[in-house]
Amino acid sequence: MDRIITDLGVIKYPNGDPDSSTLSAEKIPLLREEALAAQSADIAVVSGASDTSHAFIKSLQAALLAAG
């Protein structure tokens, strides 16, 4: 049986400075939508948010592995 990703939540956003908070608030929803559409962590890095994108993808990969 194939598993389906039905939702993704982000437990902790980067908030070290106002720019990080703003960037995360703008880009993480885009990453979330991409992952839901792809049904995997095989998604593109969002322009202007490479560190955030890589962290999101790495976290999602770990969660998918843990879920089996």
Image (cartoon, rainbow, N blue to C red):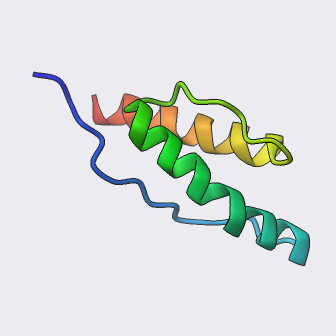
Q: Nearer the viewer, residue 45 or 14?
A: 45
State how many labels appear: 0
The image shows residue 14, relative to residue 67, as above or below, that is: below
Quadrant including the N terminus: top left
Residue 38 location, x and y as percent?
Answer: 43, 31
Relative vertical location of residue 31 with respect to residue 64 in this rendering, above or below: below
In this view, the residue farthest toward the bottom is 18
Residue 9 in the image: above or below residue 59? below
9 on left or right of 43: left
Q: Position of residue 47 (x, y in %)?
A: 81, 41
Left or right: residue 19 versus residue 35 is right
Q: Residue at x 56, y 42 (%)?
A: 59
The quarter of the picture where residue 46 lies is top right
Res. 17 visible in picture: no
Residue 51: quadrant of the picture: top right
Quadrant showing the C terminus: top left
The residue depicted at 30 percent of the width and 36 percent of the height is: 67
Task: Determine whether, in the image, residue 43 is placed left or right of residue 22.
Answer: left
Q: Residue 58, how many percent across, how many down?
A: 61, 35
Single out the residue that lies furthest toward the left. 1
Task: Find residue 14 and report its horizontal and vertical position in percent.
Answer: 74, 64
Q: Is residue 20 left or right of residue 11?
A: right
User: Looking at the image, can residue 48 be seen?
Assistant: yes
Q: Which is nearer the eye, 13 or 48?
A: 48
